[in-house]
Image (cartoon, rainbow, N blue to C red):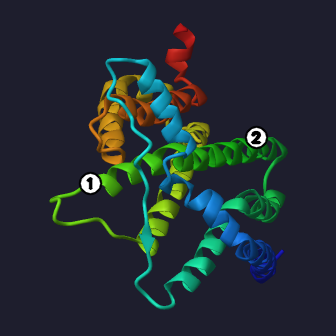
Amino acid sequence: MSFWEHLDELRGVLIKIAVIVVAVAVGLFAAMPWLFDHVILAPCTSDFVLYRFFARVTGSVSFLPQFATGDFHVDLINIELASQFFIHMSTSFWLALVLCFPIVIYLLWTFVSPGLYENEKSGARRAFVFGNVMFFLGVAVGYLVVFPITLRFLADYHVSEMVPNQISLSSYIDTFLMLILVMGLIFELPLVAWLLGRIGLLKRDFFKRYRRHAIVVLLILAAVITPTGDPFTLTVVFLPIYLLYEMSALLVKPAERESSTE
């Protein structure tokens, strides 16, 4: 195929992606009132699953700070006339993009795969399945753990009791979408490490050499995500990120000298 024929094929793939994402976004737009009430705004109430879990754990361990759930509630406000309508539309689009992530990757794969050898196709199929599982696992961790902890801290934080928090809907949605998408991408790090290892740019001894540095950096990252100062909460966020580091090390091939000694 010529360059222009390849370009025409790519345009066809991009059109298919756009049609599918828009169709799913339209369906989500219709279901968005229910999704807001039962999913997106669920962390605003004290009976959210993570809060109840923390309360049960801290209630059974005497030396941990007690996690209260009864008085927590976040009231959101809207300060712009058209804001709710545009948030309705944009949230439908971004959630459609998240849900369609496997389809988007698959359609891009159909464009790239004819130029690959059979062994490369086999590796790419495994990467496709693994990447999708890790992405949605990261989204789940972002929704169930990282975002509720962040919301809980920031909603109750005051520089002064004279300054009450009035959280706008737009800031809530921006933080919500950012954290779940960022966590989805962070959980792709093992896949990125595997790909870099496949092309020879990364070896397993890199992870061994810098493990102590990585622990410090990841602890700082977890503290930034959850600046509560609570060691239990910090551990809950730190452990998944550190497990990603160790998983990345396992997926990367050792250097020849290292593998010969093992």
Question: Is 24 left or right of 36, judged from the image as shown?
Answer: right
78 up-or-down from 163: above or below: below
198 up-or-down from 262: above or below: below
Residue appearing at x 78%, y 53% in the figure: 116
How many numbered discs, if any?
A: 2
Q: Which residue is mark 2?
A: 126
Q: Position of residue 101 (x, y in %)?
A: 70, 60
Q: Position of residue 16 (x, y in %)?
A: 81, 75
Q: Which residue is mark 1?
A: 157
Q: Residues within 10 Å of mark 2 (few under 14, many from 20)?
A: few
Q: Nearer the viewer, residue 82 or 179?
A: 82
Which label's residue is closer to the chain start, 2 or 1?
A: 2
Q: Position of residue 8 (x, y in %)?
A: 79, 82
Amino acid found under the numbered disc labelled 1: Tyr
- Tell me the quadrant of the picture where the C terminus can be found: top right
Amino acid found under the numbered disc labelled 2: Arg
Q: Position of residue 12 (x, y in %)?
A: 81, 79
